[in-house]
Image: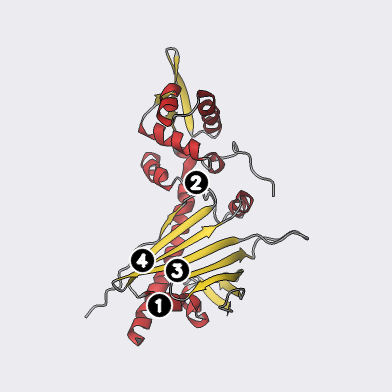
Amino acid sequence: MVAVTSSGTAVVTLPTDTQILITREFAAPKHLVYKAYTTPELIKRWWNAKRGEVTVCDVDLRVGGKWRYVMVTADGTEVGFHGQYKEIVPDERLVSTEVFEGIPVPDGEEEQGTLNTLTLAEVGGRTTLTVLVEAGTQEVRDAIIESGMEAGMQDAMDLLEELAVSLA
Amino acid sequence: MARAATTTDAFNAVAEPRRRQILDVLAGSERPVNDIVALLGLGQPQVSKHLRVLREVGLVEVREEGRQRMYRLNGQPLKPIHDWVKNYERSWEQRFEALDELLEELKEEG
């Protein structure tokens, strides 16, 4: 018997000028998705997206606890992220901050990151995962755009799809 | 970091909800300013101000037709946003495909 592995395709939308929303369906119950999302030895197996090796994966899964992931890409570049857990509802919801370590923080200034909310909703053994990334202020959003990583968190996705036709 | 002016590029120009509404209206067809005013229920000075910003980043073009100025959409400046979203989507999808495989293993383990 062939297992049904077909899942959704990640969909990214831009609900407001400071948010990114990622949605994806998985052919698995939510407690397994949550486990894969919060267990270091499991995180190491998917978070790298097969593009590098995860060399650091610290998870202190409690409110106020810190996390940090570091990946080394094939060309030797180190990419690090860290943050703090703000809200934890096992198998359903995980709110945490996320700071990209590639952006230098000027002396005396606080590092700026995003607030990420993971939600898992299960129907009939399939799980819809959403990650809402909130930049908080337009300054942070602009900083992210400047970093070349996440240009343009404006809405306009519907509009863009419509326009894409005329861009061809 | 200094905040970019709204006229710098399309990203900032479309961050304003009213300007997105104007683009939506123009996506349907070319229109004079009075149409936009009527459709959105905004004041003419406000609409004119937004149109000026949209023109500066090249999202809207204008031509004279008799005594009217006709505005139309030019989607090209939005392409970088579209490209970015697609690229971001792809990188998450790669990550999620690795997660799919892992979840299959976890299901078998029960």
Q: Are marks 2 and 1 on the same chain?
A: no
**Cα–Cα gap, marks 2 and 1:** 37 Å
Task: Give the amino acid type for the residue marked by disc 2 in the picture.
Answer: Pro
**Cα–Cα gap, marks 4 and 1:** 14 Å
Q: Are marks 2 and 3 on the same chain?
A: yes
Residue A79, visible in the rendered structure: no
- Mark 4 closeness class: few <14, some 14–19, many ≥20 residues within 10 Å: many
**Cα–Cα gap, marks 4 and 3:** 13 Å
Quadrant of res A36: bottom left
| Of the pair A158 and A146, the residue shown nearer to us | A158
**Cα–Cα gap, marks 2 and 3:** 23 Å
Marks 3/1 in contact by CB < 8 Å: the verdict is: no
Which chain does the residue under circle 4 lie in? A
**Cα–Cα gap, marks 4 and 2:** 27 Å
**Residue B44 placement (x, y as % from top left):** 50, 24
Residue designated by label 3: B95
> Could you say which disc has been placed on residue B53 in the image?
none
Q: Are marks 4 and 2 on the same chain?
A: no
Task: Give the amino acid type for the residue marked by disc 1 in the picture.
Answer: His
| Of the pair B34 and B91, the residue shown nearer to us | B34
**Residue A144 placement (x, y as % from top left):** 60, 55
Residue designated by label 1: A31
Marks 2/3 in contact by CB < 8 Å: the verdict is: no
Horizontal side of residue A30 vs A101, given as left or right: left
Badge nearest the viewer, 4 or 2: 4
Residue designated by label 2: B80
| Of the pair A86 and B17, the residue shown nearer to us | A86
Badge nearest the viewer, 4 or 3: 4
Residue at 42% from the left image edge and 12% from the top image edge: B66
